[in-house]
């Protein structure tokens, strides 16, 4: 190799030719390269990804190695370490200072599997290495205690700085708080709008969430007081709309989507998830039966110019896992598990793109 020398400047120059595929800027400009070390004919450095659930991590790793080989020497041994620091755009002090991203999971109508999707997205993000919490704000059917096998658990209270804080239930690595924990499971509690809104405010302001990358909010179906309370109480990074392919579900999903896009609310819609997209029987894993119609989620996403984050199949094991209190993503690989993992990666990707390109999130001020 003669007098060839490697130094940090040359490494940075080579890596400045590598684009982050989503953010469309190079890794050096984005400040994603850290801890460069140079040895004899070898280099190592760390790439700080915008989320541990980044679906393009191997592409980024490969591009870095190729850039060093192309711009320095093909004989250099390259070691790329990947780590992640989830991005956030929340401006100013808020009720939940340690939470980087608040994501609203909404649907136009009930029965589309929104809670199942929320539980499994949370588990998939957690398994990628992210810190995740869930607020179950669905006053009509709080499902999270059942889905996480936590029906008999009660949150504890800890005094801190002269104030009592609720400690979220911790289950399978997820921090969880639910309206279901506040009411006995066998009795019907009739919630007036203001009562439910007050409970949701407490879930933010009086709960010790600590450090979280993603806090998912499982909202009631439709558009209600709860939705307005959410956007008025904390800055929401973005919303996800869950629908099934049926025409009636899509018509209602339109309304949910339109609510977040109203000028006075203006919460970015990160994408659409089509649940029960097709039926796959366990004994015929390669077969797809489009029981509820086909392509509805894709057409909704296309109409509004937002991504279709994923299509979740109707699989018996997903339903069984929810009833058993262990989200399906925790079980062995299946078509459902793979679909949830890929959908969670797509969601994390959209959060990172939104945080890199859009304004800081603010609390919505609605005067009605």
Image (spheres, rainbow, N blue to C red):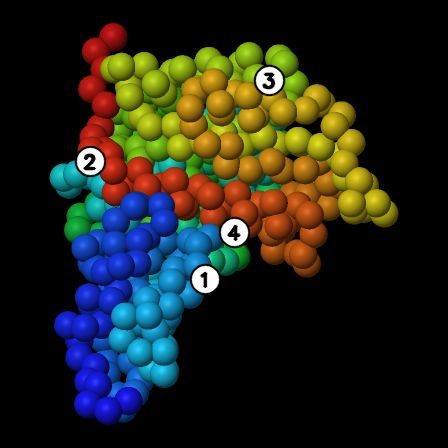
Residue 74 numbered tag = none
Residue 13, above or below 207: below
- What is the total number of numbered labels drawn onto the structure image? 4
Residue toward you, 332 or 172: 332
How far across and down, in percent of the image, does residue 272 sit?
A: 49, 29
**Disc 1 to disc 4, C-alpha distance:** 18 Å
Query: Which quarter of the figure is the C terminus placed in?
Result: top left
Which of the two residues, 8 or 272, is positioned nearer the viewer here? 8
Give how far across and how far down residue 22 sits, in percent.
Answer: 35, 46
Say above or below: 11 vs 108: below
Report which residue position mark 2 lands on: 360
Residue receiving disc 1? 58
Q: Give the spatial CA distance, label 1 vs label 2.
A: 29 Å
Tell me whether circle 2 and circle 4 mark residues in contact (CB < 8 Å).
no
Q: Quadrant of residue 92?
A: top left
Which SS class for mark 4?
helix
User: How far apart are the alpha carbons under marks 2 and 3?
Assistant: 32 Å
Q: Nearer the viewer, mark 1 or mark 2?
A: 1
For marks 2 and 3 on the same chain, the one whose residue lies earlier in the sequence: 3
Contact (CB < 8 A) between labels 4 and 3? Answer: no
Q: Quadrant of residue 46?
A: bottom left
Q: Position of residue 301 (x, y in %)?
A: 49, 25
Task: Name the residue that disc number 4 marks.
Answer: 124
Query: Residue 16 vs residue 179: left or right?
Result: left
Residue found at x 32% / y 67%: 67
Residue 135: percent from the left, percent from the top?
42, 38
Residue designated by label 3: 249
Q: Is residue 69 visible?
A: yes
On-image quarter of the N terminus: bottom left
């Amino acid at each position: 190799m003669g007098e060839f020398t490697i130094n940090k400047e040359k490494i940075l120059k080579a890596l400045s030719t590598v684009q982050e595929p989503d953010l469309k800027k190079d890794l050096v400009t984005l400040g994603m390269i850290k801890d460069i070390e140079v040895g004899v004919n070898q280099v190592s450095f760390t790439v700080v990804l915008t989320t541990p659930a980044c679906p393009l991590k191997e592409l980024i790793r490969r591009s870095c190695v190729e850039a060093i080989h192309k711009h320095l020497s093909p004989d250099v041994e390259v070691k790329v370490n990947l780590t992640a620091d989830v991005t956030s755009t929340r401006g100013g002090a808020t009720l939940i200072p340690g939470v980087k991203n608040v994501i609203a999971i909404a649907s136009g109508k009930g029965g589309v599997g929104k809670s199942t999707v929320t539980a499994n997205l949370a588990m998939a993000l957690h398994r990628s290495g992210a810190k995740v919490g869930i607020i179950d704000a669905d006053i009509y059917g709080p499902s999270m205690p059942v889905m996480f096998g936590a029906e008999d658990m009660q949150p504890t209270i800890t005094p801190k700085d002269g104030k009592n804080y609720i400690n979220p239930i911790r289950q399978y690595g997820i921090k969880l708080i639910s309206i279901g924990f506040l009411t006995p499971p066998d009795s019907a509690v009739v919630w007036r709008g203001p009562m439910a809104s007050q409970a949701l405010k407490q879930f933010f302001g009086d709960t010790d969430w600590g450090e979280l990358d993603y806090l998912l909010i499982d909202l009631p179906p439709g558009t209600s007081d709860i939705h307005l309370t959410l956007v008025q109480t904390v800055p929401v990074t973005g919303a996800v709309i869950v629908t099934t392919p049926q025409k009636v579900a899509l018509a209602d999903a339109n309304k949910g989507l339109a609510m977040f896009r109203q000028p006075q609310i203006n919460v970015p819609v990160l994408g659409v998830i089509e649940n029960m997209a097709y039926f796959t029987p366990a004994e015929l894993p390669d077969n797809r039966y489009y029981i509820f119609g086909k392509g509805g989620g894709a057409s909704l996403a296309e109409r509004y110019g937002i991504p279709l984050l994923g299509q979740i199949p109707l699989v018996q094991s997903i339903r069984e896992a929810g009833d058993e209190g262990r989200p399906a993503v925790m079980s062995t690989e299946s078509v459902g598990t793979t679909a949830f993992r890929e959908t969670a990666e797509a969601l994390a990707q959209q959060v990172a793109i939104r945080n890199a390109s859009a304004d800081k999130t603010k609390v919505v001020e609605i005067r009605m």
